[in-house]
Image: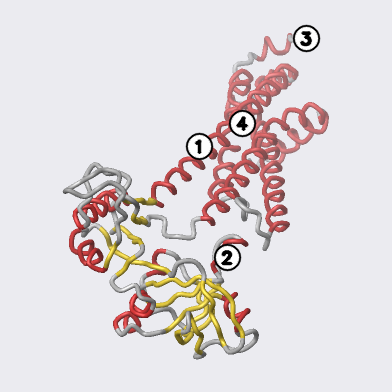
Amino acid sequence: MVDVDKWREIWGTVRRHKLRTGLTAFGVFWGIFMLVVLLGAGKGLRNGVERQFDVAKNAVFVWSQRTSVPYAGLKVGRFIKFTNDDVTALQRSVPEAALVLPRNSLDGTFSVQYGTKSSTFSVNGEYPAFPAVRPVALTQGRFINEPDIRERRKIAVVGERVVEVLFGSENPIGQDIRIKGIYFRVVGVFKGSGEAEEAQQDAQTIYIPLTALQNTFNKPNEVGYFAFIPKPGIPAKEVEVKVKQVLAQQHKVAPTDERAFGSANVEEEYARVQGLFLGISSFSWLVSIGTILAGIIGVSNIMLIVVKERTKEIGIRKALGATPWSIVSLIVQESIVITAAAGMFGLLLGTALMAGINSMIAGQEIGFFANPQVDVSVALTAVGLLVVAGAIAGLIPAAKAAQVQPVVALKDE
């Protein structure tokens, strides 16, 4: 690789056959370019979709519905109501769950006042562990804590939209707001999460301790629904099934009644999405490698033509004492140079295109597409693939060149 004479010969050959070399290298260039673009676009699509998962990737949600099967003398159509007793039963009977989170909310939206200003917002009763299920981006103050739950404190964590409407430029921390005429002290402010519309809706939410919601708004012992996080290594499906079994026993629901409880398994949804992107990535590699192989075959064919054109020259080299390895290395090196140069150009152009798209959409909400990029490992793999491809493309022509007999070569016309 450091033989200056060989580099001069390679450059001379490329310069004499510019069109042929360019057309030959285009297949390799296009294959690497398509690989980078497809993988980068796939990564952008994955980032956009994963951004929609603003909850824990292994969370399970369970809520109550109406029974569809009569059981223990109870009629069909009975609506199940969760209670605090269910929390105790689930914590005791579902050891597979690392987190059992009861939740509730005031039905609909309610007028919230501060001074002379008022507006309608959603009010949810939560526990301190809620951010483990759905992250809360605090910008001021704190979230609900255990003393708030234990002492049923009337405190509130409000969204930025609530602050904008009720407080304007005034600092809300330590101020009292009225929810249905009851005073709650603001202890924290959070930023809405998710896409533009979802984030705006989230920012119009007020979180208060669940115990305060039950005690203050005539919902004693009432739980609306549950969220669960499995222990490490435990499938979410196992927790989902176990929870429904325990709740069925608690509320005398038939074991065969599949409609009494609704549920959402985020882990299964996330796994399906990951499977989809694995298929997209595999398809991208398949298409790109197929294109690269076509380019390699083209390079190999061209190198065979080069060997044919230089048969007499190779014969003279061998007659003057050139070793087979020197002949082979010359052909293989030329093949590597063509494929590596074309591939690196494709890699750089594809990466530049992804960087340009990324800069154009930076800070914008583009739905299911965000931050397209090419992994460093993919780039290194592509470079390694180029070197191997170049060597493979030159092996057959090089072997043919090494077998040339000086006497026969000198007779070649």
Mark 4 and mark 2 residues within 8 Å of each other at the beta carbon: no
Q: Identify the element where label 3 is drawn.
A: loop
The nearer-to-camera label among 2 and 3 is: 2
Q: Is residue 65 above or below residue 127?
A: above
Q: Mark 4 or mark 2, which has the lower sequence index? A: 2
User: Mark 1 — residue?
Assistant: 279
In terms of sequence position, does the residue under pointer 4 or pointer 3 come before the other?
A: 4
- Name the residue beneath numbered marker 3: 413
**Residue 329 has which mark?**
4
Image quadrant where residue 115 sits: bottom right
Is 142 placed left or right of 281 in the picture?
A: left
Work out whether residue 133 or residue 259 is closer to the camera in this orientation and state it: 259
Amino acid type of the residue that numbered disc 2 sits on in the rendered structure = Ala
Which quarter of the image is occupied by the N terminus? top right
* Camera-nearest residue between 130 and 383: 130
Q: Which residue is mark 2?
A: 199
User: Amino acid type of disc 3?
Assistant: Glu
Front residue of 18 and 121: 121
